[in-house]
Amino acid sequence: MSKPYRTLFVGTLVQESFLSVGGTDDPYTTVDGPFCRDGLERPTLRGTGLAGALVATLRRVNKGKVPAAISCAADGRQPSVWRTFHSHPENAPVPAFRQHVAIDEKTGAAAEGALFNVETLPPETRWPFLLEVDTSRDSESRLADLARATLAEWQAGRCWLGREVARGLGWMRLENLAEYCLTGEHVGQWPQSGQAENYPEYIARTFARAKQPMPLVSHELPIGLLEITGRIVAGPRLPLEGMDQGYGLDSLSVGGHASDTLAAEWDACFLKPEGRVDPAKDFDPDLTVVMRQKGGRREAYVPGSSLRGPLRHALARLLRSRGQNTSLVDRLFGSKDKDSARLLIRDAFPKGPLTLAWFQQHAEDEFAGGAYGSAKFDRVALVAGSFEWKMVLEGTPEELREFCEEGLQPLIELAKAGQIGLGGGQWRGHGWLRWEFDEFDEFDEHARPREAAQ
């Protein structure tokens, strides 16, 4: 039998959220953070970015260790045993601009000079994936086994790529993974530069006999990760304990990029004002909610950054009110200086139908009691609907215990009580929603999530 030559892992990376991969800054564009593109202007996932994400996942599943043959840390004279390749999306996704703004935690208003936007690609964008393992230098197949364990994490949906992962971007999963074990007889067929534009098809066609069955994937979380899922719910306020009925309406107004306002359109999701025959004819809102294109129509969602910021500020206020040190905030949410975020929060997407309303508002003259000059404006807000979110917390078992007891548990109590405001118009009644949390094993060594509480 011929000696081992290469092992190829072929699959498809599918976005679960928006994705932003840094490209070349262009002073003539209208976006602060453009998406990475190649010379043909195609969106590109660079091999270096994929390699970095793979090594980060390997550290997590291999107790923090990366073999020198993979990292090239020994002498740097040989290339890594793992080789990744650039990727371009299978479909032709329409880019979307994501608006970001830093909020001053003391005032709750936008911080001066902190407004910027990034170019992203939408969820469900599909990217061909290829990893080559040089098994001629891996006689015991140990590094190929590490590749299988690493990619199993990606198959389970724990793949994070690009920038602003902590704010909801770049959450991905690996689908349709196949393994091909090549031997010395395939040296003349791989690599094949003439087929580089469509390697997955070439590999499937040429090496069909070398394809290996893939093992079943375990979706259990590895040691050092805690996953928390839940929902934020807008709609009529539910009854409190001891009351026959609820009161009030929980609504949400999360503003998006200026393009969202320009593209706003009236559809069946809006409440129709009584007596109005065709409200769509006059629909031209000053402020609208952030939307994404899905299935040929626009759909509201909640960016991960709109969840992360309020949670961070709520924890900082809570710790200061208790006279406690706020260093835990930087450890959980990251800092500009040295701390990377331990708490990652994915964008929240709707579960079920949504209902929106077009609110007419004005500034009131405090002396006359009437409308103040020409200060009339309107705002779109969501008045009914549910959004599913996901958080992942990283750390040692001891750190996870500390983070939960001192940080997450107080935040969960505040959120369940409706004391964490989201989005714009918080002082006009919007954004004080109900948070629902699925149960999770806080301090279990493997932090396995349990089924949702009924």
Image (cartoon, rainbow, N blue to C red):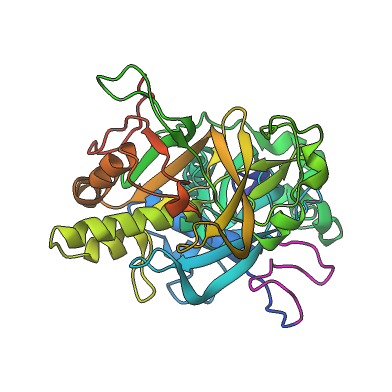
The residue lying at 40 percent from left, 49 percent from top is: 421
The answer to whether residue 60 is left or right of residue 296 is left
Q: Quarter holding the N terminus?
A: top right
Residue at the farthest bottom position: 27
The answer to whether residue 187 is left or right of residue 170 is right
Rendered position, 162 above or below 127: below
Magenta stretch contains residue 38: yes
The residue lying at 20 percent from left, 46 percent from top is: 401
The answer to whether residue 281 is left or right of residue 68 is right
The residue lying at 65 percent from left, 60 percent from top is: 257
Q: How far across and how far down the image is residue 10, in percent?
A: 67, 45
Rendered position, 301 above or below 437: below
The answer to whether residue 187 is left or right of residue 388 is right
Residue 99: name its quadrant.
bottom right
Q: How many marks?
A: 0
Q: How far across and how far down the image is residue 313, in percent?
A: 34, 59
Q: How far across and how far down the image is residue 146, in percent?
A: 46, 48
Magenta stretch contains residue 90: no
Is any atom of residue 5 visible in this view? Answer: no
Q: How far across and how far down the image is residue 302, in percent?
A: 54, 46
What segment carries the magenta color? 28-44
Residue at the farthest front position: 368
- Choose between 226 and 242: the one closer to the eye: 242
- Choose between 370 and 330: the one closer to the eye: 370
